[in-house]
Image (tube, helix red, strand yellow):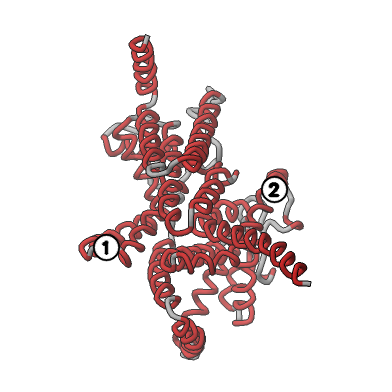
Amino acid sequence: MSWSWAVAAGAVLGVVYTLSPLTVLCTAAVVLITRWAAKGLTGRERGWFLTLFVVAIVSRYLVVAVLFLIGDESKPYAVFFGDEWIFKSRPIWMRNVGLGIPISAADFIYAYDPTGMSGHLYALALLQAIVGDAPYGVHIFNIALYVAAVAILYRLVRPAFGARVAFGGSAVLLALPSLFAWSVSALKEPIYVLTAVIELLLVLAVARAPRLAWRVTAAVALAPVALAMEELRNGTLVIAAFGAVAGWAGAWTAKRPVRIAMAAATVPVVLVLLLAQAPVYARMMDFSRELMRYHAGHVMTPGVSYRIIDPMYYGSRSAEVRNAGWREVLRYMLRAPIAYVVEPSPRNIQSRQLWLYLPEHFVWLVLIGLVPFGLLPAFRRDRLLAAVLLAHAFAIVMMVALTSGNIGTLIRHRGLSLPYLVWFSMLGAAALFARAAMRPAEGSVTDGHR
């Protein structure tokens, strides 16, 4: 009987591998990743962990299977989002060029069009040069990358912040609808998140690896990984650099109360002195105006947008943003992070999709509202990890906030901050629950003395 099942399983596996080698390879990788992440877990914790990850993986596979089944014969393949055409067609054309397979002149031009070009396209082209065409396998590939990123974060956070925080944060990252959506897509977010997690591990290893040789190796590896992040998404090299330097500095500063006091006193003074220098002030203003121009450009893209600068700087008069004064720049700098958190505001919910997003928006607001309550517990438990997470989160929040203007794009991009912030949210929730649980006990003691 066992031989019959083994033969049947082998036949099914052979058929699936013939149809999609990438699906079989990525499924094997996902199984190994899940087993590695569950290593050392016992009892109820292991059961909950495996249930969470198995449900997350299976549900994603089912969604991809539905996409495959509903494909229209009039099109080469089905997609979840319009942008996925870029990541399904262009890598195959690029692969064909590399292998010397003839393609049309139009396809050749579009394959290397600078619009939408990123390292993810080259990664998919190389992948499909190895396993063949995989228009649906790339979805499974992205699922494997995203699950790997969450599993690594779980193993990283659990020893420092506890099992409940690690489980809760992982559940948010795996179940939040917008994160679920792009984790099953062919878009570049999953590979970016995994690369960012690897960069985070290297930043921590440089500071506290047990051996000097490991620290040096981590420092050497940090540069190419940061460059890979930049290749995937423009501007993220700054996030990696700021996250590393500010994280290390923040951890060092938070070690002693006197250092915190000195930093609070000297940093504002240094910033004022720098801005008092005419060249520094001029460069800062030029950079800020360029960011304002990016924001104004995104407001003009299709979809629902939001505005945070003077109306005169939108549309055909956007070039006048180069004349914006310091007051307008300051208002923009203050409004951008607020809009990052609260949009879509009630006046901007103008489509059915945004109404459907509203429940998740409330979850987002709760998660962000819990972050401040989790900062102190995080720094008490693991100062370096907390500082590095917070520095990276601040950098990516400001980059997205200062350049966004389209609500759909904002929702997609601000999800990139949750792998850094969600752990503070879970610690904040735990701190508030603990505080609420103590109040009745304190009240009963007081009543007893009375």
Estimate how packed mark 2 is, as few (under 14), some (14 to 19) or many (20 or more) residues with alpha carbons within 10 Å. few
Residue 97 visible here:
yes
Q: Amino acid at mark 2?
A: Pro
Asked whether disc 1 touches disc 2, contact meaning CB atoms under 8 Å apart, the reply is: no
Instruction: Indicate the position of residue 320 as horizontal and vertical percent values.
Output: 60, 73
Say which residue appears at 33% left-offset and 30% top-offset: 132
Instruction: Indicate the quadrant containing the N terminus: top left, top right, bottom left or bottom right.
Output: top left
Q: Amino acid at mark 1?
A: Pro
Q: Looking at the picture, does residue 257 appear above or below residue 395?
A: below
Kindly give the residue lying farthest to the front in the view shown: 449
Instruction: Indicate the position of residue 32 as horizontal and vertical percent values.
Output: 36, 37
137 relative to 214 in the view: left or right: right
Nearest to the observer: residue 40 or residue 74: 40
- Count of number-bearing discs: 2
The residue indicated by pointer 2 is: 359
65 relative to 203 in the view: left or right: right
Q: Looking at the picture, does residue 124 appear above or below residue 233?
A: above
Q: Looking at the picture, does residue 39 appear above or below residue 379?
A: above
Q: CA distance from mark 1 to mark 2?
A: 45 Å
Say which residue appears at 59% left-offset and 67% top-offset: 372
Residue 282 visible here:
no
Say which residue appears at 53% left-offset and 44% top-offset: 174
Nearest to the observer: residue 257 or residue 138: 257
Kindly give the residue lying farthest to the left in the view shown: 213
Instruction: Indicate the position of residue 351 as horizontal and vertical percent values.
Output: 72, 47
Q: Nearer the viewer, mark 1 or mark 2?
A: 1
Estimate how packed mark 1 is, as few (under 14), some (14 to 19) or many (20 or more) residues with alpha carbons within 10 Å. few
Q: Quadrant location of residue 96?
A: top left
Give SS at disc 2.
Answer: helix
Say which residue appears at 48% left-offset and 90% top-offset: 273
Instruction: Indicate the quadrant containing the C terminus: top left, top right, bottom left or bottom right.
Output: bottom right
Of the numbered discs in the image, which one, if any, rests on residue 210? 1
